[in-house]
Image (spheres, rainbow, N blue to C red):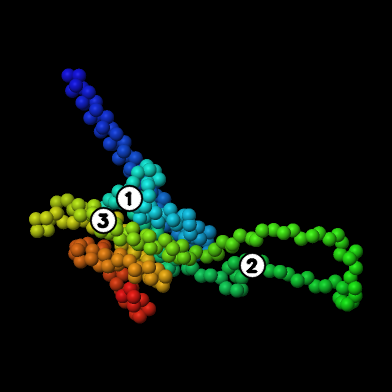
Amino acid sequence: DTSRWENRMTNKSDENDASREEEEQEAILSCSQHASEILINIIQNSSLDSAVMISLSTDPALDRILKIASLQGMQPETNETPVFVPYESTMTCAMTVVESLALQLGGYGSVENTVAGNDGSDKSESTLQILPMSPESSSEPDAPIHLTELGPHTPPTVSSPPPPPAPSIATPNTLVHHLPTLLAELSSLLSHPATKAWTIPAQFTHNEPRPLLGTSRLRILRLLESLVLLGNPNVDAVLIKSDCLEQCMNLFWEFEWCSMLHQSAANLVVHLFESKDDRAGLQ
């Protein structure tokens, strides 16, 4: 009886631990979803010269988002190695932020991204105002000037060179810098060994469980679609060296019933061929 009671208490403790861990994971996912929604709304309604766009498109903010989006490093909440799963996760939330950021950089946001011209209508510029000469000095331009008239002399102080100016507009330069590593990680995720076990419950094809694309891989395709829509030659050069687009087309033929996958793949193909010879390498 004592042994049975101990086993029962052990099983109950294990169930409580599992339930507590599940609640923690749900709380982490909920926080990630709320944070991504806030960031996406801010990105879509911010101009390229805004402080938030400049911050999110440069390091360290962009580096941290990209690492979460590609499952690099440890989970900051649990210090555990992240696992590639087919459903919504912190990784997919980060991917939606990167996708929105790339679309905004490409001019597909809700705010028109225009840079002010030289008239200074949209941005303030400090100008040097030249005051007119006094009547006394203008009447005798060649008159000698005595040192006593200049007042006490203060020697100039030697200072260090000023720091480089901060970027005045958000650009994809930092994203291009991280892109080779990002695409390599995304390519490995598209063909991750864990995806072989992803199946749809109660759906069979030729007496075999129907494979599941998964929300995570669909998010990767959406992210790649946004990079293609960016239309940046430097981004295209990195995409050409990667096999991510080739894997997207392989998934297109593998999952013949996934309409959302087909829509993303079709957008990729149409946008590339509409560019004609400008993007012959990607075509």
Proximity of marks 3 and 2: CB atoms separated by less than 8 Å: no
The amino acid sitting under disc 2 is: Glu
Q: Left or right? Give the position of 144 relative to 221.
A: right
Please name the residue that numbered disc 3 is placed on.
192
In the depicted structure, whether residue 235 falls above or below residue 71: below
Q: In this rendered view, identify the residue nearer to me: 29 or 82.
A: 82
Whether residue 26 appears in this view of the structure is: yes
Looking at the picture, which amino acid does disc 3 mark? His
Residue 166 vs residue 77: left or right? right
Tell me the element at label 1.
Answer: loop
Quadrant where the N terminus is found in the figure: top left
Q: Position of residue 174 (x, y in %)?
A: 46, 62
Q: Residue at x 48, y 57 (%)?
A: 59
Q: Is residue 268 left or right of residue 6?
A: right
Q: Which mark is residue 125?
A: 2
Residue identified by numbered label 1: 89
